[in-house]
Image: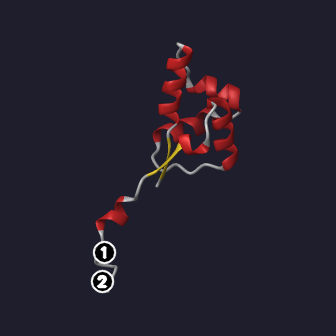
Amino acid sequence: MIRILLIKLLDEKSFQEKRRITLSEVSEKTGISRATLTRIANVPGNVTNTDTINALCKYLGCQPGELLSYIEDEEMDAGPTETQPTP
């Protein structure tokens, strides 16, 4: 699963700029709706598009690799299930 590390990077930017940055401010600066930003921040595995990733990277001053993190799906780690025959 791909996770978007929006909150982590917003916390870092807030610390560097010594001020609180809200999702409303990010929405105003990036053109991304507040509802979309809330989903990105709160829903693991939320699907988004490259335009959104581009706008966030531009605002946060980061590369996509700093914004995105790959975490193996739990299903992949669980091994075979009853519906999956073992070889």
Measuring 33% from the left and 79% from the top, which residue is drawn there? 83
- Name the mark on residue 53: none
Q: Residues within 10 Å of mark 1 (few under 14, many from 20)?
A: few
- Name the mark on residue 86: 2
Above-or-below relation of 23 to 87: above
Q: Quadrant of the C terminus?
A: bottom left
- Kindly state the secondary structure of the residue where label 1 is placed: loop
Q: What colour-coding does the image apply?
A: secondary structure
Q: Residue furthest bottom?
A: 87
Q: Residues within 10 Å of mark 2 (few under 14, many from 20)?
A: few
* Residue 5 % position (x, y): 50, 39
Measuring 60% from the left and 25% from the top, which residue is drawn there? 24
* Residue 63 % position (x, y): 61, 40
- The residue nearer to you, when weighing 44 against 71, is 71
Amino acid at pointer 2: Thr
* Residue 73 % position (x, y): 40, 59
Amino acid at pointer 1: Pro
Above-or-below relation of 14 to 39: above
**Mark 1–mark 2 contact, CB under 8 Å?**
yes
* Residue 59 % position (x, y): 66, 30
Measuring 32% from the left and 84% from the top, which residue is drawn there? 85
Which residue bears the numbered disc 1?
80
Mark 1 and mark 2 lie on one chain; the one further toward the N terminus is: 1
Above-or-below relation of 47 to 53: below
Q: Residue furthest top?
A: 18
Measuring 64% from the left and 43% from the top, which residue is drawn there? 53
Q: Quadrant of residue 26?
A: top right
